[in-house]
Image (cartoon, helix red, strand yellow):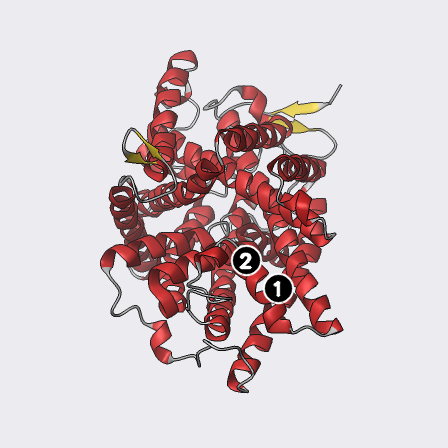
Amino acid sequence: MTEVINRPGGTAPGDKGLKGGALGLLSGVVIGLASTAPAYSLAASLGALVLLVGEKAPAVLLLAFVPMYLIALAYRELNRAEPDCGTTFTWAARAFGPWAGWLGGWGIIVADVIVMANLAQVAGQYSFLLVGADALAESTLWTTVAGVLWILVMTYICHRGIEISARLQYALLGIELVVLAMFAVTALVRVYAGDAPEGSMVPSPGWLWPGGLEASDLVDAVLIAVFLYWGWDTAVAVNEESDEPGRTPGRAAVLSTLLLLVTYVLVAAAAVAFAGTGTEGIGLGNEENSDDVFAAMGSAVFGESGFGHFLAILLIISVLTSSAASTQTTILPTARAALSMGAYRALPKRFAEIHARYLTPTWATWGMGIASIVFYVGLTLVSGNVLADSISATGLLIAFYYGLTGFACVWFHRRELSGRGLWTKGVLPGLGGVMLLVAFALSSIDYASPDAGATTVFGIGGVFVIGIGAIVLGAVLMLVYSRIAPAFFRGETLRPGTPDRT
């Protein structure tokens, strides 16, 4: 029988039994970057961006960075005040009360569970592509089986300890970033040397400015780009396991967003320049390439030589390692949000249990892994189109809980808004929250259209139904649980206002 440590609710931040001091700044940055899955995110989303905005994709990535950076500042300031692994759940509860906090925690959990389905599918598919089993890669059954196995393996690694998780991320992220850099450099060199295929374009400064785009396309594209950046907050979710809980995680989050900006803009510009925006062949305007631009471009960029073929295989490996790494790092913040919610009795107290040897959340880790498998298999059985729409719906959930964090930062620090704090704790986080609120509202209206996604439900777009439906479901579950265990919702275990101190 597994031995666990059960921490009582209402304990001070950092006293949940996690292994403190296990992670430094570099480990935090690596975990933050790995959580965003740069190779996978670009492979799966760059084509959709180009279909909306053409060669302006780098501009959209620059624009989406702005709210991400502002919310990263909010995370840094809130973490400095209260380094609790519940992040948005804890901070929103402190600022606005338990109901807002519970919904913030739910936003983290449901967004992560939804995206795990797509990450597992990509990991399963690329596992077969790597060994040349293309027929199995096209099989829904076998890619689902492989995806489930990936979730189980990564859940087990998360269960075994945060240090093992961090060491694995060094290797996986290293492969990913090196291959992406080689892809971008090779593509740009061939473009400027005149050795790129027909349809290629020389990069222009105009690609970095969104002028001329229709407002609806720009908003939808920004939400897609927000999804690309999403995940850096994992660096803060592991705050109670960091060497300086109040300082290191916030710095890691900000550094992660800056490194992602450089990576995304460079790779996007290189891909657009090399492949162009045409609707045929490897052109990024070709809808057949939108699901995976690297699969379409890899051989063309690296060439048909033996070494070029090797690099193309490495590109496949990078997408595989990216999705696998993100599968693991997606479990980390979800489990820790559930751990914090369990510690403060916003969820059953079993979620607060810590493994006595590994010092990781036991029920929270395995619970999130199993929930992800159930969701993944369920959506796969329903329809591949529903699975595709669920990923688009994740953007709404991200905007919801990131935006809530920005507003929480302003209200939490409302008595400290003077001097430098006026900007770092007030104006900038608030602006980030407003930007995401606007994107959430406009995209919700757009996604409600029956032709906005791949599915419809009673004449309403499937993306809207999944995204807004997930939030409504959370509200219903919150009301039900408030009747079952009212202590948290009465403010008895996590009170609004000043953080608990020992």
Q: Secondary structure at mark 2?
A: helix
Distance Cα–Cα, label 2 vs label 1: 8 Å
Q: Which residue is mark 2?
A: 38
Q: Relative to 108, is 313 on the left or the right? A: right
Q: Relative to 250, is 395 on the left or the right? A: left
The part of the image, by quadrant, that contains residue 120 is top right
The part of the image, by quadrant, that contains residue 186 is bottom right
Residue 65, given in percent of the width and then of the height, sits at: 40, 61
Q: Which residue is mark 1?
A: 177
Q: Are marks 2 and 1 in contact (CB under 8 Å)?
A: yes
Q: Residue at x 59, y 31 (%)?
A: 373
Q: Relative to 456, is 286 on the left or the right? A: right
Q: Residues within 10 Å of mark 1 (few under 14, many from 20)?
A: some
Quarter of the figure that contains the N terminus: top right
Name the kind of residue labelled 1 in the image.
Leu
Choose between 124 and 493: the one closer to the eye. 124
Q: Is residue 417 visible?
A: no
Q: Residue at x 56, y 42 (%)?
A: 330
Choose between 138 and 500: the one closer to the eye. 138
